[in-house]
Amino acid sequence: MNDLLNTLQNKLVPSWRHQLVGEFEKPYFKDLIQFVDNEYSEHTCYPGKNDIFAAFDYCDFNDVKVVIIGQDPYHGPNQANGLCFSVKDGVKHPPSLVNIFKELENDIGKSYPQSGNLEDWAKQGVLLLNATLTVREHEAGSHQKKGWETFTDAVIRSLSENREQLIFLLWGGFAKKKAKLINAK
């Protein structure tokens, strides 16, 4: 078992580990982890290895209230922090995040924030999940169809099957394809 998988299994909070442990033993997941390890050793990839599973760090499975699904991490230097649509403090807001903040400003009058770091949202029960959790620098979509979608589909199904009264926000055409995994009731 490689270091990334060990880190995941040791770092993941118990509630998420309980929900996802079955995925870790599946062949696709082992292939995915090997692919990610190879990509990070041969290329610059985002987010940093310690932030790949950050979406699960701030929000316990049982505390999730809202699920926001994006496509893949930002692929520019110092942008991705493991939470979809979120950037590190001090980083210029990418267009998708600018649009989110403008909508909040227009819809509910919330002032446009200086920081694009959405960790506070995550701590309040917002799971900020990209369908693909890693990406090669300057190559959007480069880690698609490698297994991440299977893993994140399992996350979405688990939430939909085991939790009630969740709100799912599917921003963008790619994320909207995930609607079939969600129990609309």
Image: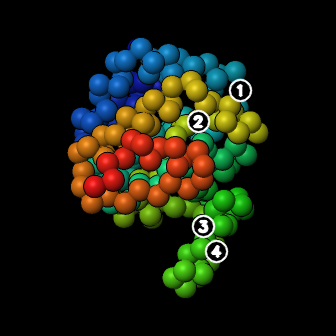
Image location (x, y in percent) of residue 105 = 59, 80
Numbered badge on residue 43: 1
Nearest-to-viewer mark from 3 and 1: 3
Task: Name which residue type carries label 1.
Answer: His
Q: Residues within 10 Å of mark 2 (few under 14, many from 20)?
A: many
Task: From this view, report whether residue 142 is shown above or below residue 97.
Answer: above
Circles 2 and 4: CB distance less than 8 Å?
A: no
Between the C-alphas of marks 3 and 2, the distance is: 22 Å
Between the C-alphas of marks 2 and 4, the distance is: 27 Å
Task: From this view, report whether residue 10 is shown above or below residue 28.
Answer: below
Task: Name which residue type carries label 3.
Answer: Ile
Task: Name which residue type carries label 4.
Answer: Lys
Sooner in the amino-acid sequence: mark 2 or mark 1: 1
Quarter placement of the N terminus: top left
Q: Which quadrant of the view contains residue 112?
A: bottom right
Residue located 44% across and 21% down the image: 29
Between the C-alphas of marks 3 and 1, the distance is: 30 Å
Nearest-to-viewer mark from 2 and 4: 4
Q: In this rendering, does residue 95 appear at all?
A: yes
Sooner in the amino-acid sequence: mark 3 or mark 2: 3
Between the C-alphas of marks 4 and 1, the distance is: 34 Å
Numbered badge on residue 134: 2
Numbered badge on residue 100: 3
Image location (x, y in percent) of residue 63 = 28, 56
